[in-house]
Amino acid sequence: MAERCAVIGVGQTKHDAKRIDVSMPGLVREAALRALADAGLGFADIDAVVIGKAPDMFEGVMMPELFLADALGCSGKPMLRVHTAGSVGGSTAIVAASLVQAGVHDRVLTVAYEKQSESNAMWALTVRIPFQQAVVAGAGGYFAPLIRAYIRRSGAPDDTGVRTALKDRTNALANPYAHLVFPGITFEQVASSPMLWDPIRYLETCPSSDGACAMVLASEKAAARAPGRPAWIHATAMKSEPTMFAGRDQVNPRAGRDCAAELYRKAGITNPRRDFDVAEIYVPFSWFEAMWMENLGFAAPNEGWKMVCEGATAMDGDMPVNCSGGVLSSNPIGASGMLRFAEAALQVRGQAGEHQIDGARRALGHAYGGGSQFFSMWVVASERP
Amino acid sequence: MTEIVKSITTPIRLEYVYRPGRATSRFLRGLAEGRILGQRCPVTGKVYVPPRGASPTHGVPTEEEVEVRDTGTVTTFCIVRIPSEGLSIPPPFVAAHILLDGADIPFFALIHECPFDQVRMGMRVKAVWVSKEELAPTFESIRYFKPLDEPDAPFESYREHL
Amino acid sequence: MRDVAIVSFAQAPNVRCETERNEVEMLMPVVAEALAASGIARGEIGFTVSGSCDYIAGQPFAFVSGIDAVGPWPPINESHVEMDGAFALYEAWLKIQSGEVDSALVYAFGKSSMGDIAEVLTLQLDPYTVAPLWPDAVSLAALQARVALDRSRVTERAMAEVAARSRRSAKANPNAQLRGDFDVDALLAEPYLVAPLRKHDCPPVTDGAAAVVLAAGELASRSCARPAWIRGIDHRIECHSLGARDLARSASTEIAGEKAGAFTGSFDVAELHAPFTHQELILCSALRMAPSVSVNPSGGALAANAVMVTGLIRLGEAAARIHAGDARRVLAHATSGPCLQQNLVCVMEA
């Protein structure tokens, strides 16, 4: 029953620690105008806008989409604002797609961003509520114990995380938009970088970035008039579970497994490692690549690290993951999920430039958030579904 | 010549009154008496500490109160080696998930009185409270956890809590 | 388009300050009541979506613990908007229209009492040029009222009449916070709070929570004796900059009304999300409300205004009139942003 929907325009900003050369409106416009140019459209051609970002306290503006409406040409149009924690970039794209799939609109602009330099994200994450336990040292302090649990459960070699970090940081050298670039980076440099939240090292950690990502999503009719190749959306899925409950598997959460299962069923994927040519998954700390390979069904439980150690997830491996450099290289939190979705679309459109996987036809975009509890994913392909 | 303004500082101050709700209030009152009070999910029978009033898996109120022990097992942990805003303790320190005896969900706490490189999964620990006079309805009533002179718990005993 | 209806609605009593229960404790009975009324089992709901705002709760990720009230296990298909719950309902409607699901649970919560809500809302303004001046929400509304008084047929007496009628209607609403009989002349003799607004022109500060169940086609008919079928729903935003808008009218409401089909046929009831008295008059004009329409029989936002919930309650209250057999065709409206910047219009029929 759903209308077909395709990505016909992709844009992103240069990601950096502090984009003081632009305001928030300037940042979102940079990405939006690039996506529109890619689609051969202007703001006037857009029917509706869907914005996503992570907590408003990161910038100190409540519901900033209200003041960004002017910069995104929204006057007189519908606008929605999504917030599902770290997965928000992905869920925002999915909400935008549903506007087309529901048959309501033909061309929807979706934008996700974060401009963390305008406030203090670490502070925003650790607001001290009098009667709540302190969140110890931000996201790293939260996820490091889960990584330790994964290492214990799987028996993964200690350098698994270092390998993923080295791969993603090397991939980032071929991405002109990446925030962190370390030319000539070596295994030893990553392995000898300081422990921040043992077992997570400095170079195994994502940065805090300013940045934005935008896409133009179109109905089949509108996609037919687009100048470039569309990336067709074959399936989308979202799943959530509680932050904590007795007996919860936080290392390999069921919400992620269920989300992937539903996504694959909708897209007709039976063997993800064979059926996908490339994947962009949300890896904010290096070890999560191995963990998510299992959660997403690319590897058997406790064997995700083998894919990392064998080089399967490298650019020249059989299942390239995060050719863009991933979240480890650019992390404008609210946009990080949409960047995964957008990079997947770029790959199947053959527009990923220096980090293109030749002939990529089908790609996975993945995002997660909260305490590994909110998941959003999509499958895009060069062929119409 | 027009100089471009690249940044302005606009301080924001908002004040909020936070209210913990019924379940957390009970828990905090317990701490003021030197006790750790959880609540049991009426469907699964699992004991939640600290309780938040709802069974997260079934969306029903948790009303039965259950006192748990102030001893427990470290299920996993990390060693924080960088300073962080809002934290008074200097790094390195150990932040751990502790499965309290009688509870079904790990409790987040700090571990001291043990070299940080000797903290391990399965280690048995006990709460160190503030003095009786200082007990108050706040998390700070428990200063931290320290090692117990007991053999480590086997991995299988806490595996499902990871 | 699929036939989609609101099949149940529940809300917490709207109160000045909920001191005992946290948000999850407030939500649980509301969600349970809405689900029970729909007869759709928790595990059968296809999609769950909520509306809430971190700055109301004074902490990041405020919505995260909210989902505990639903008991999302096994994992559920779920989303959240940092908007009033009415816009969450729109997302749910989309999901059903796309054919992905046949039912949805929508909920919203907010405890405006936690902070100084008029100041908190200041943070919605342009952070570089307007917010640093700290104009609060009441002052901005007063600015709009001034324009409306000077440029349209709005009068201070008409505004007082809106206040008196809203709070009189609220007497029949057990969940309302402000209710009673007020004399218009006596109200007009009161001093200004922020001229030209008097206290009665402004909404109360409210803590609240609400939930709605949506269902499609036959499932809706099985779930409810008289489903409130959504015949049109649309929302529009306009310029943020107050100087760039005609504050005496609501252009975005006019477009949303047109798209939602508000200008054909008549309505028995309209639930309008107007936190300030003059805004109801502006909205009635934008929606070309006939004098015969019963506007805000619940008392509206002037009787209870839990920010992030009030809009969803308008949709729920309007639908409930159909469920109860008191109305055949209703209009519901929700707003967001300073001075009615963004507006949603929904037309429902028995």
Image: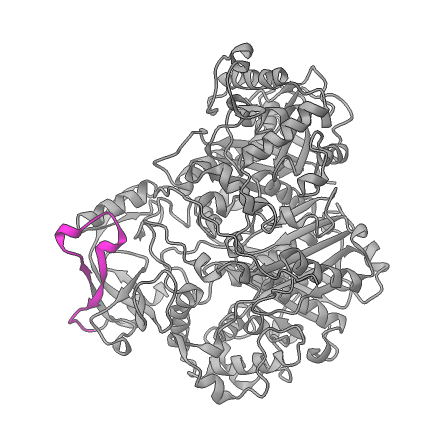
Of the pair C99 and A103, the residue shown nearer to us: A103
Q: Position of residue A4 (x, y in %)?
A: 76, 55
Identify the image quadrant of the N terminus of chain C.
top right
Identify the image quadrant of the C terminus of chain C.
top right
Left or right position of A109 against C78: right
Task: Tell me if residue A46 comes above or below residue A322 in the rendering.
Answer: above
Is A97 colored magenta in this rendering?
no
Task: Tell me if residue B127 comes above or below residue C202 in the rendering.
Answer: below
Of the pair C158 and A270, the residue shown nearer to us: C158
Left or right position of C332 against C261: left
Q: In which quarter of the image is residue A196?
A: bottom left
Which residue occupies 55% across, 10% down? C185
Write the start and end of the magenta stretch as one range.
B127-151
State the scheme by which the image is colored.
one colour
Which residue occupies 55% across, 47% down? C132
Of the pair A172 and C160, the residue shown nearer to us: C160
Q: Position of residue B116 (x, y in %)?
A: 27, 75
Q: Can residue C271 be seen in this view?
A: no
Q: In which quarter of the image is residue A179?
A: bottom right
Q: Where is residue B104 in the image (x, y as percent from the top left)?
A: 30, 57
Left or right position of B54 against C350: left
Is B150 colored magenta in this rendering?
yes
Task: Tell me if residue A123 comes above or below residue C65 in the rendering.
Answer: below
Q: Can residue C266 be seen in this view?
A: yes
Task: Tell me if residue A12 comes above or below residue C314 in the rendering.
Answer: below
- Residue furthest out toward the left: B132
- Residue furthest out toward the front: B1
Which residue occupies 67% across, 19% down? C268
